[in-house]
Image (cartoon, rainbow, N blue to C red):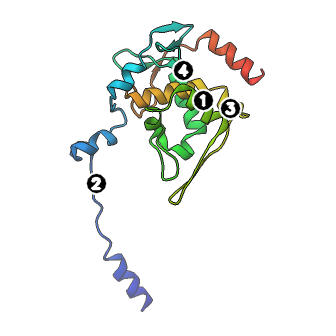
Amino acid sequence: MLGLVGAAVIGTVPTATFVFAQDAKPELANKLDPNAKEIDEPVLKAATAVKDEDGKYTDKDGHPTFRVSNDGKKVDWYTYAGYRRYHAECHVCHGPDGMGSTYAPALKDSLKRLSYEEFYGILAGGKQEVNNTANQVMPAFGDNKNVMCYANDLYVYLRARAAGAWGRARPSEKEDKPEAYKKAETECLGG
């Protein structure tokens, strides 16, 4: 009898349905394409690089920013390093590519409203929001060199994501690692 029940259950398994990106609804197609960019003009304009000092780009306010060149295929070293560090330290909670998760916000959206100083403060000191519907706790990373030595990289990468200057894919082309970056990294890590 057990064998017949098992056969009946197996016989009722529905066939699989596949949806391809090109067949998706237009409003979902961009989310399915890892190379698609969701340009946010005001954020992009505010993040425009106006200065380059040893491969480190800054905006008009002197805050770190990104540079995407070569028809949108090549990023500066800090954006590339930020991508790598984000996926080493942050994606477990905040989701791949800054897209968020069920228990941590989408940082690509948070960087649309957070200033550099606010971002840095939250990264170093943590944040806690407790209310009737949620209990969100961002740990403090102020003592974690694997995070704080790369805070600017994280900010630059997430700023590029927020502006829509960089999509969800890993940067395939990057500028060379600047000597100033190498020196700062060695000093910060204590090497």
Question: In the image, 90: left or right of 70?
Answer: right
Distance between the alpha carbons at the discs numbered 3 and 2: 40 Å
Which one is in front, 15 or 158?
158
**Residue 134 placement (x, y as % from top left):** 53, 56
Residues under labels 1 and 4: Cα distance?
Answer: 16 Å
Q: The disc labelled 1 sits on which kind of residue?
A: Tyr
The tag earlier along the polypeptide, 4 or 2, is: 2
Q: Given this view, does label 1 or label 2 mark the residue nearer the observer?
A: 1
Please identify the residue farthest to the front as the structure is shown. 131
108 or 178: which is nearer to us?
108
Q: Are marks 3 and 2 in contact (CB under 8 Å)?
A: no
The answer for how far apart the CA atoms under marks 1 and 3 are is: 14 Å
Q: Count residues near mark 1 (Cα–Cα under 10 Å), then give few for <14, some for 14-19, many for 20+.
A: some
Residue 18 numbered tag = 2
Q: Which residue does the image show at 53% across and 18% down from the upper left?
A: 63
Q: Which residue is mark 3?
A: 146
Mark earlier in primary sequence (1, 3):
1
Quadrant position of residue 160: top left
Q: Earlier in the sequence, mark 3 or mark 2?
A: 2
Q: Which residue is mark 1?
A: 120
**Which SS class for mark 3?**
helix
Q: Amino acid at mark 2?
A: Phe
* Label 2 element class: loop
Q: Amino acid at mark 4?
A: Tyr
Residue at 50%, 13% in the rendered image: 57
User: Relative to the observer, which residue lies in front, 54 or 65?
Assistant: 65
Badge 3 amino acid: Asn
